[in-house]
Amino acid sequence: MYLKFFVLACISSHSVLDVYAGDCSTRCEWLEWKSWTTCSQTCGTTEKKSTSRSLCCPSDLTDLELCVDYCSLDIADHYDEADCGRECYNGGTLSSAGCVCTSRFYGMCCEDRLDICEAIPTDVVFILDSSLSQTQTEFQKQLDFVGKFVDNVDVGPTAFVLSIITYSSTAVVEIEFDDSNSKQSIKDQLMGVQFRPGVTNTNKGLDLARSLLSVRMERRPGMYTKKIAFVLTDGLSNDRTKTEASAKLLKGEAHVVAIGVGPEVSHTELVAIASPADDYSLSYVYTVESFDALYTVLERLIDVSCEKCQPKSLTDIFLLVDDLPDSRMTVTEWQIAVNGLATIVDGLQAFNDENGQRVGIAQFPDTNDPIKQLSLSNTLRKDDILHFLQVMAPSEDTCRGTKDDCVLKSNITSIIQDVIDNQFTSSFGGRDDARKVLLVVSSGRFSNITEVAEQMLNIRLHTDVDIFDIGPGGDVDMRGLKSLVSEPSRVFVVKEDSDMASLDGLRAKFSYIACG
Ligand SMILES: *[C@@H]1O[C@H](CO)[C@@H](O)[C@H](O)[C@H]1NC(C)=O
Ligand SMILES: *[C@@H]1O[C@H](CO)[C@@H](O)[C@H](O)[C@H]1NC(C)=O
C-alpha cells in the first residue's frame, strides 16, 4: 500500500541521511521506498535502476548503520536495485554493449526488421589474382566478375559495401570500403585497377582482406553486418600451406567463396580456401563466368521466406563416359572416373524430386551406339544408379565384323553433339525449365586437339547445355580437357581416389538459387 503519511514526513526532512530521526510514529520501522531512479534508455544496456528507504530511528542515532544495529535490522533492506526492465525484442540478447539482435532484426531494442526480400547489409571484399599465372585477359575477367556483381546488387550503407584487393608478390587495396560509394563510382574505380604481375602470394591477399574486414564498423545498431570474401584464384599459389593457414583465419572473419580463374585451375586448393558446405550451398567453389556465386550469396543474405529468391535444384545432368579407342582410359583411370561420378551422384540432395535433379548416363565405345545407357527419363533410385556406375566396364575393342563395320563412326565431338541434340529433349526425359549440365569424363588424349577445340567452340555457341569435364588420374591431357569446355575452371582433375573433394565445386552447380 501507498503510505502517504510516511512519505510526506520523510521528504520534508533529511535527504542525505537515510535515517529519519524526526517524528516517526513507530521507531525502528522502515519508511516508504523512494521512487526508482530513472533509466536513461528504453532498452539495450545492462543499466540498473535503484531505490532506497529511510529508517525511523531514535533522535540521538543519526548514523544508519548504528541505527540498523540498534533496531536489529538488516542494512541490505535499505537499498534495492533492479534491471531497467529492458529487453531486446525479437529474440535479441542483451550484452554489455547493447542488444545483439537475431538475423534480419536491428535497432536499439531489435525492434526493426528488414524487409523479407531486402538483403542484410553486407561488406564484400574481392580478392583478385594479379599474379603472372594470370594473363591480362584472365585478369580482365576477374574485373568483369566484380562489375557483374555490382550491376546486380544494391550498393550503399544499408546494402552492399565493396572493397577490392589485388595480390601478386604483395597485396594492394585498390578500392577501400567506403559507405558513400555508389554503383557508378565503384565501376569507375574498377576501370582504373591495374594488372600488377608478380608471384602468387595468395596468403597476402587473404591476410589483407581479413584486416580490412575486421576494422569495419557495424552499420546498423544491433545488426551484425555480414561479411563475405570472394577469392579469385587459380588455386596454384606459391605456398599452399601459408595460403591454407591464411584462408582459415579469414574464414573466422567472413564467409569465403572461391572462384576459379586462370589458364589452369587447381580445385583442391579452391576447396581448401572456401567456406565449407552448409544449408545454402553444397559448396562455395564456383567458376568465374557463371552467376552461381552471386545467387548463392544472395540466398544467404535474403530471408528464406522471400519468394523472390528460392533455392532450386531443377537440373538435368547427363554423364558421358568417353570410351573411344583414341582416348580410352587406363584401368586405374576408369576406376577413379567411376568413383568420381559416384561421389557426384551420391551428393545430389534432391535427386529424383520433382524439382530436383535427374541423371542420365552413357558410355560411348567406337560405334555410334552407346553400349551402356540410361536416359534422363530413367526412374532408378540413387542406389541403383550407383550400382549401374559400378558395373560399367571399359569396352574391349572386339570388332568382329567387316572392315567397314569397324571403322570409327564417331568421335568425341560428334558424340557430344549427339548427346546435346537428343538426351536433353523431352522425349528422353529432359525438362524444359531445368538447368542442363553435361559432364564428360575423359582422359583428354584426343589425337587432334586443335580440331576438337574448334568444333567444340562451335557446339558451345549453339547450346544452353553447360559443359564440364572430369579428368581422372595424373596422366590426362589438360589441353584436351580444356578444349571441351568454355573455361579452364570447368576442368576437374581428380588425381586419385582420395582426391574427390576437388569435385565439390561441381556439386554446387547442381543445387542452385534463382532470384525472381
Ligand atoms: C588437326 O586439325 C586441324 C584443324 O582441323 C588441321 O588443320 C590439322 O592439319 C590437323 N592436324 C593433324 C595432325 O591432323
Ligand atoms: C567427328 O566426326 C564428324 C562426322 O562424323 C566430323 O565431321 C568431324 O570432323 C569429326 N571430328 C573430329 C574431331 O574428328
Image (spheres, rainbow, N blue to C red):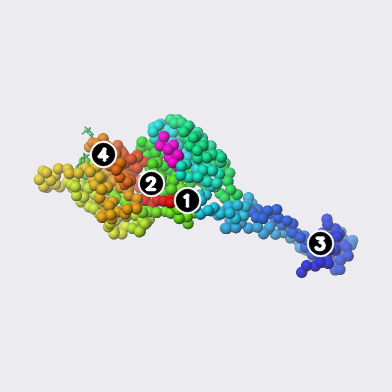
Please name the residue that numbered disc 2 is placed on: 505
Front in this rendered view, residue 305 or 398: 305
Relative to 173, say whether 312 is above or below: below
Task: For mark 3, give the secondary structure.
Answer: strand
Please name the residue that numbered disc 3 is placed on: 54
Q: Are marks 1 and 4 in contact (CB under 8 Å)?
A: no
Residue 147 on the magenta span: yes
Please name the residue that numbered disc 1 is placed on: 300
Please name the residue that numbered disc 4 is placed on: 455
Taking the view exactly as shown, the residue that stands out farthest to the right is 60
Name which of mark 3 and mark 2 comes first in the sequence: 3
Task: For mark 2, give the secondary structure.
Answer: helix
> Seen in the image, is 20 located left or right of residue 223?
right
Q: Which segment did they paint magenta? A: 139-149
Q: What's the amino acid at mark 2?
A: Gly
| Residue 219 horizontal/vertical position (percent) | 58, 46
Name which of mark 1 and mark 2 comes first in the sequence: 1
Front in this rendered view, residue 228 or 337: 228
